[in-house]
Structures are given as structure tokens and as C-alpha cells.
Amino acid sequence: MFRCLENFRHARAVFKAAFCTLFTACLLMLSTAALAAQGAVILLYHHVAEDTPPSTTISPADFEAHLSYLKDNGFTVVGLDKAMDSLRSNQALPEKSVVISFDDGYSSIYSEAFPLLQSYGYPFTLFLSTGPIDSGLRNYMNWDQIREMSDAGVIIANHMVDHPYMLESLDSESDSERLDRLRAELLEAEQRIEQETGQSHRYLAYPYGEYDPAIKSILQKLNFVGLAQNSGAVGPESDFLALPRFPLASIYANLDTARTKFATLPFHANQLQPDSPVTTSRSPSVTLKFETGDYNLSQIGCFANSKPLAMNWIDREQGVVELKPHESFTGRRWRYICTAPDPGSSRYYWYSVQWINPD
């Protein structure tokens, strides 16, 4: 009798432990699925042509290859407004959601990209610099074409009036005067877009992807969303004053590498210091905090120019790490990229740090 009772208790304990393990695993799977469904990837294009500057150009054939790949591989192309509304309210998006965006307002967007996107039924956003349109500049669309796109459901959003270097002051201009000028230009562009199309979404794509904390503060006070050009996926925890986008032009338009970017997942990561992408250093260090997620901290790798960055784990348990480069970087802009494999798929988590040295 006692032996039977003892066996029963043992069996119950084993069952309880097994149930708890299974229940925890199910919760983890549900949580992982929810997090994945709360991410999106924003793609950035400029020219869709054969004879424009390579650094901002994708050929029509390569662009259609991108669209075809998205259609054939389970991606859902959603409008920027739907993505922003869902992510900011912590609502789920379709799995493998992608947003398509264009900057500037070049004529090839109308002649090449627009018909292709219509044939696929894909929504997209045009970030428009209004000055070249008002001036009738060659190789840019005109307002009639832009209104046609707007009437077809294309989101028309803000890219300033004259595509300025927003970190640069004019001659004898103080920093506060620079910020006042940028604020006025931002609102002027928004007003022109609304006058011509009836649209006002308060989305700004930073020209050249450049910004600083003071510019972000302007956007925050005016209730704008800011979009940059540092790569990575977006999620509910992303910085909505500097959302990453994947620029796809030149060698980066190659489908063999672009397909990995299409499927990336958002890290829940924060940049602790410095708080600005603007630097006077040619080899800046940065401290990041990776929150708990469905990735192994030991599998995070960080790179610059395809070379590994030194990772000094300040507090591995809390996910705090300092990235220190071994080299100096040239040019005005560069970035550090961190990735980690998703254990449940062939996808990668992706986060990048933008650096701008205006000197």
C-alpha cells in the first residue's frame, strides 16, 4: 500500500515537472512568434534606372527581381502607415513584413518603379524633396505625376525642401539659428506636400540619413517620425525618431545579399553612450545594451567594413557590451553592424550604429 502511494507521488511529480517544462517551452515559442510578428524591414531605393549614379541606383531588372523574390518567398509588403501604427501600438504585423520606400522624387520612380509596384499590388512611400519639384529640375517628377501616384494610394512624405545637410550651418549661422531654419524648412515641405496631394503623415526621411539629438528633438516636439539610413529591422522598441532602413543600391542591390536583409529581425537593443551619431573621432567606441530575446548573447557578432569589432562585455548577464574598433575610418559616414542568428530559422537579428563625421 505504502509502495503504491509512493509510486503514485513519484509519477505525479514527474508528470508535473514534464508539464511545467512543456508549458514553459510553449510560452517561449508563442513569445518568440509574437516578437517576430512585431517586426518589419524598411527598404530604401532612389533611382531605378541604368544611367544614374551607381551609389544610389538599382536597375529596373534588379528591382523587379526584388519584388518577385518578395512575392515568391512569403513576404508581405505593407504600407509605412500600417507598419508605424502597428508597431507604435504594439500590434502584430504579418510575418516577414516589408515596407518599400523611395527618397528624393526622381523621374525613374514614376516611369520604372511605379508601374512595376502597381503590377505587384505593392504599396510604397515616396519621401519627397519639394524644392526640385517646384523648380522643375531635370530628372525629377512633376506635381501632376506625384498627384497621380498619390491618387493611386502612394504615401507622399517629407524629405525637406532642398535636401540639406542638416548638420551643416550656413555662413555666420549660430547653432540655434540652424535649428530654427531646419524647423521652418521641415514645416514648409510638409505644407507643400499637403497643398499638392492632401497628404500630411509627419514622416521625415533625413537627407543623407544625417541627424543629431537636437534635430530629433525638433521632430519629437512636432510629432514627426524620423527615418534614417542605418541598416536593421524595426520593432516596437525601435527609436521612432531614427528608424533604420536598408539602402539597396549599387553592390547592395544584389539579390544574393539583399534576401538576407529582407528577412532580418529587430534586436531589442539600446545605445547607452554616446547618445549622438555625430563624432569627431575616426575610431569611436560605443556601449550597447542587448535586452533578453530569442538569441544567444554569445552568438552576437559585430562588424565594421566586414571586419570584426572587439566586443568588451561589461556585463554579459545584463547584455551590456562596448564595441571598440581596431582601425580608423574614412569618409563622412560609416556604421557598425551587429547580428545574431535566430535559432528557429535561417533569419538574423540585425542592429546597426550610425556614425557621422562632418569634418
Image (cartoon, rainbow, N blue to C red):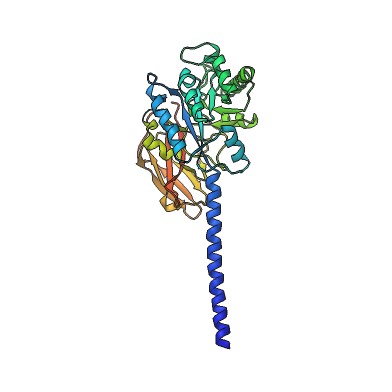
Q: What residue do we see at 52% from left, 60% from top?
A: 25
Give above or below for 278 relative to 197: below
Residue 184 is situated, as x and y percent measured from the top left of the image, at 61, 20
User: Residue farthest to the bottom?
Assistant: 1
Residue 179 is situated, as x and y percent measured from the top left of the image, at 58, 24
Quadrant of the image containing the C terminus = top left
Nearer-the-camera pick, 301 or 262: 262
* Total labels drawn: 0
Identify the image quadrant of residue 337. Answer: top left
Quadrant of the image containing the N terminus = bottom right
Nearer-the-camera pick, 183 or 273: 183
Identify the image quadrant of residue 63. Answer: top left
Give above or below for 149 relative to 227: above
Give above or below for 357 relative to 2: above
Residue 240 is situated, as x and y percent measured from the top left of the image, at 57, 36
User: Residue farthest to the front?
Assistant: 119
Q: What residue do we see at 62% from left, 17% from top?
A: 196
- Is residue 277 at all visible to an observer of this figure? no
Residue 294 is situated, as x and y percent measured from the top left of the image, at 49, 52
- Is residue 351 at all visible to an observer of this figure? yes
